Amino acid sequence: MFKNLTMKDAIILILLVSLVVFMGYFYVNNQARNKLWVKSYPIRAEISARQISCSDASPAWLADILRYQTKNNNAPANQIAYIELDGRLHHCENGYEGKYPLLSAANSEQTRFRYASVTKLWTADAIFQLVKNGKLSLDMPLADIISEIDTPKDPRINNINIRQLLSHRAGFDRYSIFGQDMFGIGKDICPNHLAELNDITLGFDPDSQTSYSNLGYCLLGEVISRLNNQPYTDVIAQQYDFADSSLQFVSNSAMTDEVDYNYVETGLTGHADIYTAFDYDGLASAAGLSGNAIDLAQQAHSMAAKSAPNILSLDTEITCDVSQLRDCYGYAMFPYQPKGQSAIVYYRDGGLLGLSSLVVISEQGGVVALLSNGTSNKSVQGDDVKMMLYKHLTTAP
């Protein structure tokens, strides 16, 4: 039957067979399919970068930030909100809510993003409110509130106080067996097995060094819960009027109005998705919130305007270099002041699989909130974008 094939027919047949083999290979090989999807990102980024909408009279640099995020930081969908010193609000959005550009709805100012560690702003602010209400002091020992701490084998645990938990100086090493890192490293201590605090050994003496700790913020959430006699999530939802905003706590599944995150597993031992990789109930006070950039900017703006201590407050007894990003950690945010510059800004960032979040506040009161459905290959924290936002916030009229 093949004797009558023309050269043209043979070429077409070869191409069809090759296409079937190609498609079959990627259909059965999930890892190869995911790697191909990652390599296609420049095409998706170009499409998303052209899909930008902004509120009237928004500064041009807001859209510039979104283009940069899209083309350089693996984030095809982004929201940015900016509150000027006089209170005027601007916002821009780009990309698409779903995985496939052009085939899903455009990303809007109402699309939901996970806030990741930016959630810690609410936990810190709620702690400060307890201090102002006379229910708590920053030097109060944790053991005075968490009654399960009664006979710790490491007596240093009795000395951990609220100030040290806020500033990540309580002695918890997130990469040790007791660190409760978000990626499953460590024991399940907080919030459901607090008695196990009696059995752990701290990684260092409290207040002797800084080590970023989600366990510390989980414990702060438990402090908030006990001093208010309500679950942490209920306290925060009521205190910050979630009913009048987009803010909601997330769980281990996608929400119906949530953006799709630019994450695929490309390794044999990687996490399959963002939703099942973490215990969001246990991380509610450290990384459990979601919403849009407008509500994030407005709530951060309100927190920063409160009397001290507030989210911009620093422990003046800690020696650090504010000219280096993330060298200094305040009670809620990182202060940053480049050498030779007089202006200070404060950062609070977050990152999970396939997403990043950032709040930047100038000492004068300008606020930027940036939410992205991707993370940079160069730096999960997006230090290049921080530098860009420092310039815009410190030179704004």
Image (spheres, rainbow, N blue to C red):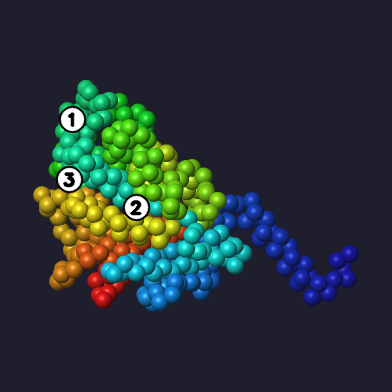
Q: Which mark is residue 209?
A: 3
Residue at 30% over, 26% down: 195
Viewer-side residue, 249 vs 38: 249
Please tell me which of labels 2 and 3 falls first in the chain.
Answer: 2
The x and y percentages for residue 396 are: 27, 74
Q: Nearer the viewer, mark 2 or mark 3?
A: 2
What amino acid does circle 3 point to?
Answer: Gln
User: Which quarter of the figure is the N terminus placed in?
Assistant: bottom right
Residue at 59% over, 67% down: 102
Disc 1/disc 2 C-alpha distance (Å): 28 Å
What amino acid does circle 1 point to?
Answer: Asn
Whether pointer 2 and pointer 3 mark residues with C-beta atoms closer than 8 Å, the reply is: no
Does residue 304 appear anywhere in the picture?
Answer: yes
Mark 2 residue element: helix
User: Which quarter of the figure is the C terminus placed in?
Assistant: bottom left
Query: What residue sits right under mark 1 in the picture?
Result: 158
Work out which residue is located at the far top of the displayed protein and give it: 151
Crowding around mark 3 (Cα neighbors within 10 Å: few <14, some 14 to 19, many 20+) is: some
Viewer-side residue, 50 vs 248: 248
Does residue 160 appear anywhere in the picture?
Answer: no
Crowding around mark 1 (Cα neighbors within 10 Å: few <14, some 14 to 19, many 20+) is: some
The x and y percentages for residue 254 are: 52, 48
Residue at 27% over, 62% down: 361
Query: What residue sits right under mark 2 in the picture?
Result: 118
Image quarter of residue 90: bottom left
Whether pointer 1 and pointer 3 mark residues with C-beta atoms closer than 8 Å, the reply is: no
What amino acid does circle 2 point to?
Answer: Val
Residue at 24% over, 54% down: 306
Q: Nearer the viewer, mark 1 or mark 3?
A: 1
